[in-house]
Image: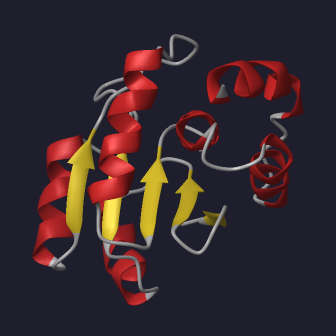
Amino acid sequence: MIANKVTDDISVAPQITVEDVAAIAAAGFRSIVCNRPDGESSGQAAVDDVKAAAEAQGLSFSYQPVLSGRMSIEDVQAFKTLYEAAPKPILAYCRSGTRCAFLWAFSQAGNMATGDILAATAAAGYDLSGMAPALERIGK
């Protein structure tokens, strides 16, 4: 399992497996957020199986599927609500972690300076610099 730390409160990751959940709990995460639709590709762990494993480890689990390339402002608002309510630190996952990084970045527009958002995602391995104008617009 690869966890890319964005801030002390959130890391993003590519698809996890049921077997990864114990290591996620051992690493100190308190919540898992799945942003990948179930059945998006063959071989991905079913969300219900990951949720059961997370709950067995005492972790909070939220499922907010977002279609790749179709993130909406409603998706961002839903993620922001999940992010604010979930016990921290959070591990959010999707196919590659990029969707989660986008959701977090846009959910923080207006709360953090755009440069700080972009620096945090870049340090985690996600170059969202092309989104700077959109982050600025949403943050106003």
Answer above or below: position of 99 versus 9: above
Q: Residue at x 59, y 66 (%)?
A: 3
Q: In this orientation, which residue lies closer to the viewer: 63 or 39? A: 63
Query: Image point 40% across, 77% down: which residue?
Result: 29
Let me know if residue 41 appears in the view: no
Left or right of residue 22: residue 62? left
Residue 131: image quadrant is top right
Identify the image quadrant of the N terminus.
Answer: bottom right
The image position of residue 126, as x and y in percent, is 78, 45
Total tally of numbered discs in the picture: 0
Query: Residue 46 appears at what percent x and percent y?
Result: 24, 41
Q: Nearer the viewer, residue 128 or 94?
A: 128
In the image, residue 100 above or below residue 23: above
**Of residues 37 and 121, which is closer to you in this image?**
121
Q: How is the image coloured?
A: secondary structure
Q: Quadrant of the rendered structure where residue 42 is?
A: top left
In this view, the residue farthest toward the front is 140
Residue 37 percent across, percent down from the top left: 33, 27
On the picture, is 127 further left or further right than 89? right
- Residue 27 in view of the camera: yes
Q: Is residue 24 above or below residue 86?
A: below
User: Horizontal and vertical percent for residue 121?
Assistant: 75, 51
Residue drawn at point x = 40 percent, y = 24 percent: 75
Q: Quadrant of the C terminus?
A: top right
- Horizontal arrangement in the rendering, residue 113 relative to residue 84 (left or right): right
